[in-house]
Amino acid sequence: MQELTFLFPNQTQAAKTLYIGLGDQEKLTLDSQSEQYDAQCIKTAFSIADLQDLGTLAASQFSRAQALNFVFDLKVFEQISPVEVAQWLAFGLHVASYKYQHKTKAAIDLPACAFSLSSDDQHLQQAVKNGQILANAQLISRELMNLPANVLYPVAFVGAVKALGLPGIECEVLSEKALEEQKFGGLLSISQGSAKEAQVLILRYRPAVAQASKHLALVGKGVTFDTGGISIKPARFMSTMKFDMGGAAAVIGAMYAISALALPLNVTGLCGLVENMPSSTAIKPGDVVMMRSGTSVEFISTDAEGRMVLADVLDYAQETLAPDYLIDIATLTGGAGIALGKGYSALMGNHDDFISQIKAAGKTCGEPVWHMPTGDWFKRPLECHFADLRHGGEDPHGSPCVAATFLEYFVKPNQPWAHLDIAAMSYEMGHRKIYGETASGYGALLLTHVCQHLSQQEGGEE
């Protein structure tokens, strides 16, 4: 057996011992009725997600203990290395200390680190530190997502991120006037129905290492509230549309972690920030707009707004940055959740090796992806008599793949690109202990681990 002990010096109750790897049930649970130990984990086959959840479960169940002593059956370490175990337990323990507090203005508050590892092993100590960084990355995303839309609108989003003071990251903002000058026709067509001005937030991370020769651009959808516009959504669950900036929130969380972990990869995060509202100035179905790329697009449903925002920002990112890799991430379609539930986020793309890297990253952080197709039949709903493209079809068949195929029209030849549709993962993730009852912050871990995998591929180190 091997032990990992986490110390919580500010708590008042005696230490608790948890035996991990006892029993043969699949459900992750702690049995507090054990005579020998304070709790036993009734599970034998562990995944990364299990360890994350175990940390949160233990911290929640024994919230006043001065120490948590995890005693592992060595069979666990045949599946996952001790360093990974320490990292993901620390992640779960730190996430457990988060509770959203209502704010009257946009601000990001992170819980103080309440524990340390009782060990002289420097590899394990660094793993715990990394786990805390990754937890904060996800919590930054959650904080942004949890804020109500009357508090967090595009300009306020920018202000909250600037106030966070991300170390090692340069910040630039394209105002609505600048977006007009740059001819962001798709993005501004969504924003035109709202009194809130659109913004594009650009965050640049450039590590001071010679081997960082490659460049990844991350593009996040930041619709701070989505009514559906003229194609208005049903009233039921409308309040959850404040989560429609989950892609942008994931980019912000990832940029924090990428910098804090000092990953040897150049990364630029771009967030297209708008509010989609119905008004006398809102875009209408049947209207045609000119995208930044010079492509004309006919609107079908104004509730298919995210792809218009992303397409313009993707075009800008490629023209101004010429990145080696390009990812967009968005709470884009309900169809992705219908297809995959909450077990996987949807992944589409145009480059097999890049797709493989993202799939591997999902497995190593507990945010798995499922590769879905683009092109072929999915081009048919985009055929149009009134413009170069329609931005979607009248029926829901293959909607996640149709949306990704639309975005692919704005990806330049030979540009490795991937699209992540995380709509189903933004909230109501009750099957996982780490997410709690509010927004999930999903995607921050995934993007960070994509960067780690690309760094290793280029000869860097985590």
Image: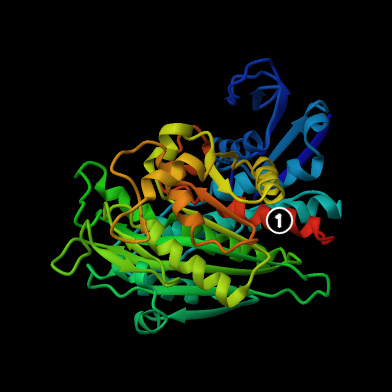
What residue is rendered at 25% in x and 70% in y?
192
Compared to 208, does 348 lie above or below? above
Q: Nearer the viewer, residue 124 or 410?
A: 410
Residue 331 screen position, x and y as percent: 42, 50
Question: Which color scheme does this rendered protein use?
Answer: rainbow
Residue 33 screen position, x and y as percent: 59, 19
Examine the image and state in which quarter residue 461 appears.
bottom right
Residue 73 located left or right of residue 112: right
Callout count:
1
Residue 206 located left or right of residue 385: right
Q: Nearer the viewer, residue 323 or 81?
A: 323
Residue most extreme to the top: 24
Figure quadrant of the C terminus: bottom right
Residue most extreme to the front: 385
Please name the amino acid that badge 1 sits on: Asn
What residue is rendered at 81% in x and 40% in y?
82
What residue is rendered at 25% in x and 53% in y?
228
Q: Residues within 10 Å of mark 1 (few under 14, many from 20)?
A: many
Residue 185 located left or right of residue 444: left
Question: Is any part of residue 462 visible from this angle?
Answer: no
What residue is rendered at 25% in x and 48% in y?
238
Figure quadrant of the N terminus: top right
Question: Is any part of residue 398 visible from this angle?
Answer: yes
Residue identified by numbered label 1: 130
Residue 453 screen position, x and y as percent: 74, 53
Residue 116 screen position, x and y as percent: 71, 53
- SS class of the residue under badge 1? helix
Examine the image and state in which quarter residue 179 appears.
bottom left
